[in-house]
Amino acid sequence: MEPTQPSAIHEIPNQYSIPWSVAFQVSWAGVRRRIFRSAITMLGVVLAIALLTYMFVTQNITESLVNTNDDALFILLQKAGVDPFSANRVDSMTILLITLSLITCLVGIINAMLMSVTERIKEIGTLKCLGALDSFIVKSYFIESSLQGFLGTLFGIAIGLLVAILIATTNYGRAVFTFFPGLAAVKSILIAAVTGLLISIVASIAPAYWAAKKEPVEAMRVEE
Amino acid sequence: MKDQKNIIQIRDVSKVYRRGVEEVHALRSVTIDIERGNYVSIMGPSGSGKSTLFNIIGGLDSPSSGEVFIDGFRLSDLSSRQLAWVRCRRIGFIFQSFNLIPSMTALENVAIARIFAGFSPAQARRDAGQTLERVGLGHRLHHLPSQVSGGQQQRIAIARALVNQPSIILADEPTGNLDLHTGEEIINLIGEMKAKFGITIITATHDMKMLSASDVVVWIKDGAVEKTARKGEINIEVGTIDGKTLA
Ligand SMILES: Nc1ncnc2c1ncn2[C@@H]1O[C@H](COP(=O)(O)OP(=O)(O)OP(=O)(O)O)[C@@H](O)[C@H]1O
Ligand SMILES: [Mg+2]
């Protein structure tokens, strides 16, 4: 692929477009090295998904315990503030709380990504001087945000699950494990995972396009 | 159409920046021909328009009027994807503040430019390693920019500029952030690249040391070309210019 010597204007090739797989390798290295900065962006996802997972799994556990029709467990459930007769209904407060936390999370990621783009305006300009196309910038910021969303979601699920089981065990003892609602919990975790990924993908669209709009001349910007 | 002798032709280029009602004439009908394989230094005081001229030559900014030809092609005729190709394959940029990507190692910083040219990451890393060796950094491949000195960072940037075998190097004050001695080493290295690969070098500088390496020196002042001197003439000129700047 030696540079050709174009003799007419239409012989000057269009710049090569970097495939997703290569953009992924480049972004992955960046996320790993800027792990502290990435963690800040991830934190929003971690908290929101942890809350979501916690609430869903707790709901699964109480439902499963209510269904045992065990008198001793009913006393424990009532002590923990659960009404055994309405336990299979998710109340509107919970839904509101979850929705709010997800919106906060979305805004949080967008904000953190915009900040991270602002910090790297000069870097984006430099990449464009080296021949990066807008599409490469979009891809790499999109991948970066999705990776952070993916990792954040994983941590969030782990934390939410752990806390839900921990609190349930303190309230109801070993019964939690005896009657653990495995299938329902897996379903809850899947919902949380999809939600986390969806939010981080949606949140990354605007910052990625904003980053790609930066001009190569930004490379010359003098900082401080 | 194709000019074999002049790789860059700058024709009557003017640039006006508008800040509200105020107009800044950063360049005033600048015309310069740059010969293939020459080392051209653009000299001028701060604010004289050197960076503006560089940005326009590199296709990073467009002139308010006038035209720039590279290899005989008018830059304004190129599509944005063609312009990206020209920046990638024809021009190597070197910056005053090095502009390395802080989260990438020396090797990755150089390899990314090669990846943009369409090479596989594995091939890009091989080529990057060789180019880094050529600039004397074979032993620093896996260091981050923050882990090497300023002079070494600029060497990484030079390797990055060279890795796609460009025909032009554009260096806006490449020694501006370096001490005297390191700056001299960098200038020598850039001069070597000209000698070895026949690359056309264009640097902007306030730095008199640059002159000895130059084939042509262009002085600009208030956005206009004040004078142009070729090699043999430079030594005589240095005295006067030195006198002027020192006074
Ligand atoms: N983006 C801009 N908007 C408005 N004015 C600008 C802009 N860029 C440069 N200028 C003005 O244009 C003139 C030329 O600036 P330029 O940066 O080209 O000078 P320079 O010779 O590179 O200076 P230095 O040696 O300090 O780098 C200056 O008066 C500067 O203030
Ligand atoms: Mg300048």
Image: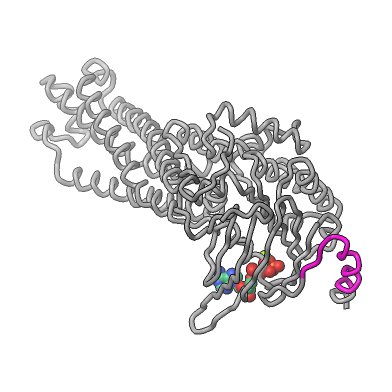
Indicate whether residue B97 is drawn in magenta.
no
Residue drawn at (71%, 56%), measured in percent from left and top? Answer: B35
Identify the image quadrant of the C terminus of chain B.
bottom right
The answer to whether residue B18 of the structure is visible from this angle is: yes
Residue drawn at (41%, 45%), measured in percent from left and top? Answer: A135
Answer with left or right where residue A117 lies relative to residue B123.
Answer: left
Answer with left or right where residue B84 lies relative to residue B52.
Answer: left
Q: Quadrant of ligand 1?
A: bottom right
Closest to the observer, B244 or A110: B244
Residue at the farthest front position? B1
The secondary structure making up most of the magenta span is helix
- Where in the figure is residue B1, as x and y percent of width and height? 56, 56
- Where in the figure is residue B205, as x and y percent of width and height? 75, 62
Indicate whether residue B229 is drawn in magenta.
yes
Give the color scheme: rainbow, by chain, secondary structure or one colour.
Answer: one colour
Q: Which residues are magenta?
A: B228-242
Residue drawn at (70%, 31%), measured in percent from left and top? Answer: B130
- Where in the figure is residue B211, as x and y percent of width and height? 83, 60
Is A105 drawn above or below residue B14 in the view shown?
A: above
Closest to the observer, B207 or A111: B207
Residue at the farthest left position? A85
